[in-house]
Image (cartoon, rainbow, N blue to C red):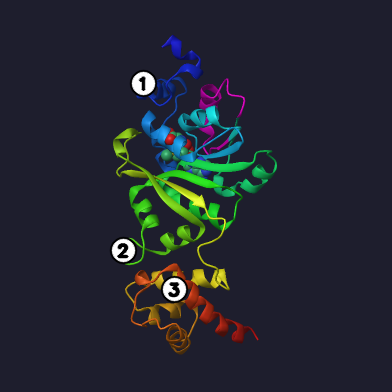
Amino acid sequence: MKSLETAKNMELYSLSTLNYIRKKFGFHNAKSLGQNFLTDKGVIDSIIEATDINEEDLVIEIGPGIGVLTVEAAKEAGKVCAIEIDKNLLPVLDFTLKGYDNIEVINQDVLKTNLNDIIKSSTFQHTKVIGNLPYYITTPIIMYLLENEINIESITIMMQKEVADRIIAGPGSKTFGAISLAVQYYCEVSEVADVPKEVFYPVPKVDSTVLKLSIRTEKQVQPKNEKLMFSCIKAGFGQRRKTILNSLTGAGFSKDEIKQALERLSIEPKRRAETLSIEDFAAISDELAVFVEKKDE
Ligand code: SAM
């Protein structure tokens, strides 16, 4: 295996390289950190292509692992900033990323990283996020990126297929829920690829999907009170079997207040949250905002 001693020419994604690296560095994949590494060049290429990277871009990668996506992004981008929580991967990344002068590895939990500081201190025009996300914190990572209004253009990420199905679902669908509304409010969502579980090492229990979330310059709706709209969504889907009249009491309103709001909007109180669109939730929260204002007086 002497020829593998310089990493730049190796096929990082191949299983034999991964085995070589695991042996060389005594590295064991940590299940608790969702370390299922990609071993398929086609999938890596589809993530890079969908991200549409050029040299004016800063790419932020969440969880580089041994660097399979990192090196491919670095070939196209101005700079790649790879955030990896596992310090055991640092000597591995030192080896696999040697020779690339536009990659910075940050050993941190992405959820505790101030991404806006990283973006502000760089000189690049656009910032794009990529990653093969650890399954155990996919939703918190997505919501962290969206709710903190981090200045990014797009997020191209691999996640469990079941989570992707929920994100892309529309009203009336069984998988439609608070996460669909939240992500679609901030982003235009497109499906990049379905990925079978066999292309990961170790092989996980479930299949995956790559989604591209393109951040909207203008949000899907403009509610008077965004926080209130999301508490209505949370209350509505928190008890999704209940009628909207009953479930919205969970957002702190009386049935009488909810009835009045729904009546003004001609929304049938017997409907359930899963049949309502983001426009409906924005309109309901706009009507209910009146009662919040009265309580605040
Ligand atoms: N990108 C590599 C690949 O595709 O082969 C690795 C993907 S693996 C599914 C997820 C990676 O995220 C692991 O390297 C893991 O250590 C890292 N990770 C897990 N939790 C993290 C966190 N909170 N912040 C940053 N990285 C994290």
- Which of the two residues, 254 or 170, is positioned nearer the viewer here? 170
Of labels 3 and 2, earlier in sequence is 2
What residue is at 57 percent from the left and 72 percent from the top?
A: 225
The N terminus sits in image quarter: top left
Q: Secondary structure at mark 1?
A: helix
Q: Which mark is residue 173?
A: 2
Q: Is residue 95 magenta?
A: yes
Taking the image as drawn, is residue 114 in sight?
no
Q: Which residues are magenta?
A: 81-102
Q: Which residue is mark 1?
A: 16
Camera-nearest label, 3 or 1: 3
Q: Which residue is mark 3?
A: 280
Residue 38, how many percent across, how many down?
39, 33
Taking the image as drawn, is residue 80 in sight?
yes
Of labels 3 and 1, earlier in sequence is 1
Number of residues whose C-alpha sits closer than 10 Å to that of mark 2, classed few (under 14), some (14–19) or many (20 or more) = few
Residue 191, how many percent across, how many down?
38, 47
